[in-house]
Image: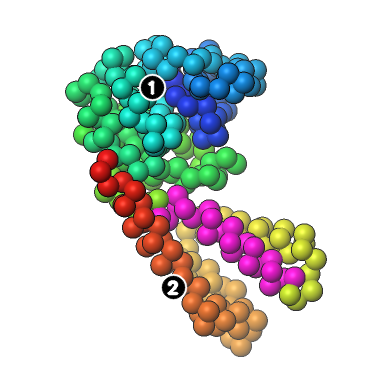
Amino acid sequence: MKGKKIAVIGGGKMGEVIMSGILTAGLGQPGSVTVTDIVPDRLAYMKGKYAVAATEDNRKAAREADIIVLAVKPQGMADVLKELAPVIDRKKLVISIAAGIPIRFIAEHLKKGVPIVRVMPNTAALVGEGAAALAAGENASGADLAAAREIFDALGVTVVVKEDLMDAVTGLSGSGPAYAFIMIDALSDGGVLMGLPRDVALKLAAQTLLGAAKLFLESGKHPGELRDMVTSPGGTTIAGIQALEEGGLRSALILAVEAATLRSKELGKGK
């Protein structure tokens, strides 16, 4: 990454988060980063806050960059690729975070041999706790994948998968924050039912999920083993777990991932 010029095409929320992560992690200096957007006020905000170059000219930004991050909406990808194609060659690395857009689609719109890495991040990247899966195209080298991974490691946790697993990633971690928000809301409802003030219940519910996730990630223990550590025979936790099993929580979460994965496959058809 050292000395590389980076263009972030699309200055929306995720584009800003990626750019901020690059700067915060020291992967690039403001003078080496350019962000583009179609909204002048958005560009002025980015330039003022981060001191990066900001422009409406996608082609100029891509021409001058070594790494191009495509942070545009999926429905606008074809038009953006058509605009950028003349200035992107195999010496540049293209990273796409557009959901449902396969590497093949991007490659077909660019010159032959361009290295492409597809990434599926999630919204927790907004607070530096994202989960992102990366898949490398056939022209992407190990160094290309490492460069892309370095960027998203600055925003949370990364894994590398085969591209045909990206729909499953979408169903699990891409949509997963929404499942977690529902669990926080439901747990807080339970607390309110039992007499807790709403603000207290919400804070306890959110911190409980955060703490449990951190304990799992840092302990290296299986979730079942950690569950058993807080489940005493005949105690309160096993009574709660029994209620969860009777309510079908485990099956509901499995089905949620399955349904979101299948929907992702549907949306990607024809691309």
Residue type at the position of mark 2: Ser
Quarter of the view holding residue 233: bottom right
Q: Secondary structure at mark 2?
A: helix
Q: Which residue is mark 1?
A: 67
Residue type at the position of mark 1: Ile
The segment highlighted magenta reads: 171-192
Any part of residue 161 in sight: no
Residue at 55% x, 83% y: name it: 242
Quarter of the view holding residue 92: top left
Residue at 41% x, 27% y: name it: 69
Residue 149 - label? none
Residue at 25% x, 24% y: name it: 110
The answer to whether residue 38 is magenta is no
Count residues near mark 1 (Cα–Cα under 10 Å), then give few for <14, some for 14-19, many for 20+.
many
Query: Please, is residue 260 above or below residue 254 in the view?
Result: above
Judged left or right of residue 64, residue 43 is: right
Q: CA distance from mark 1 to mark 2?
A: 42 Å
